[in-house]
Image (cartoon, helix red, strand yellow):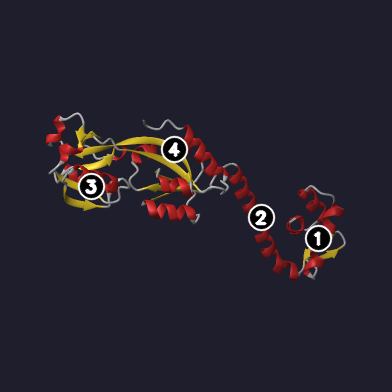
Amino acid sequence: MFQIRYVLAAAKQLNFTRAAAECNVSQPALTKGIKALEEELGAPVFHREGRRILLSDFGKSMLPHLQHIADEAAATRVLAENFRLLEKVPVRLGVLSTVGHVRLARFLATFEKRHTGMELSVREAGMDMLKDQLSEGEIDVAFLTQTEDLEQAFRLHPLYSERYVVVFPPDHRLGRLNAVALSDLSGEDYVDRLVCEMREMVMSVCDAEGVELYARFRSEREDWVQAMVLAGIGFAFMPEYSVTLPGLLQRPLVEPCVERVICAATVPGRRHSPAVGALMRASQGYAWPG
């Protein structure tokens, strides 16, 4: 790279003395470097006419390529410096589709303000897809619900816990209650959240307790579930921080009380980039709800 730099300076100045001054080296060092590059390329880059130098035809053909190499080297140095400074280093975050986005967005906004210039991409997916993407290195970190099988495969960092609540429209009879037991819901119209990772557990408790629920609407999309509840189709079970639609009422689910823990998952033994390390530290120090 020094030899290329010397050639480019000499081609610009058409004088070895001025080129050496531009490169902040002695003239013998510059001419020696240029001669070494010419020997490696197999042809003279310059015609030497006393103190005067001119680009040879070979030199003219090589100059654009040498300039391209120098430009690429400069770009590489910038990328390396940005990486060291945690700038423009993309962090690939996967988020479980049932995690409430409002509080998560507040955390990410706080994180980006403290690390200006860092690039962050967020992918939303279901539990199985996030586990696969994390294992395959397609994402760096996943924010999802802590489960026993996750504990066996990944390194988990708990962030916050949240209760499951019963969500219903403003004119629903459940609005008079301070909390809702499963027994209060038997026979009620129900909006089924198909992607809920706690769904099977809640359904099995309903079966054991003889609680009958009639699912009038089923969806994998959280926005549709909340919209249909607000439209009066029925109630739904939801994590308390995932309720985002204005106008919905919610009451804690009791008997049984159901909670989940949201955690940040990474792959054991996989080295973090400085940017990912900064995200993990920020997630542990953030004042999460609850």
Instruction: Say few, some or many: other residues with alpha carbon within 10 Å of mark 4 (under 14 / 14 to 19 / 20 or more).
Output: some
At horizontal 21% and vertical 31% (from top left) the residue drawn is 179
What is the distance, in whole Å, between disc 4 and disc 3 at their CAs? 27 Å
Type of residue at label 2? Ala
The residue beneath circle 2 is: 73
The residue beneath circle 1 is: 34
- Contact (CB < 8 A) between labels 3 and 2? no
Name the element at disc 2. helix
Instruction: Say few, some or many: other residues with alpha carbon within 10 Å of mark 3 (under 14 / 14 to 19 / 20 or more).
Output: many
> x, y (%) of residue 278?
53, 39
> x, y (%) of residue 167?
21, 39
Front position among marks 2 and 4? 4
At horizontal 33% and vertical 45% (from top left) the residue drawn is 98
Type of residue at label 3? Val
Type of residue at label 4? Pro
> x, y (%) of residue 89?
54, 47
Label 1 vs 3, first from the N-terminus: 1
What is the distance, in whole Å, between disc 2 and disc 4 at their CAs? 42 Å
Name the element at disc 1. helix
Front residue of 14/37: it is 37
The residue beneath circle 4 is: 158
Q: Is residue 64 above or below residue 195?
A: below
What is the distance, in whole Å, between disc 3 and disc 2 at their CAs? 53 Å
Instruction: Say few, some or many: other residues with alpha carbon within 10 Å of mark 2 (under 14 / 14 to 19 / 20 or more).
Output: few
Which image quadrant for residue 208?
top left
What is the distance, in whole Å, between disc 1 and disc 3 at their CAs? 71 Å
What is the distance, in whole Å, between disc 2 and disc 1 at their CAs? 18 Å
The residue beneath circle 3 is: 225
Q: In which quarter of the image is the N terminus?
A: bottom right
Front position among marks 1 and 4? 4
* 231 horizontally vs 80: left or right: left
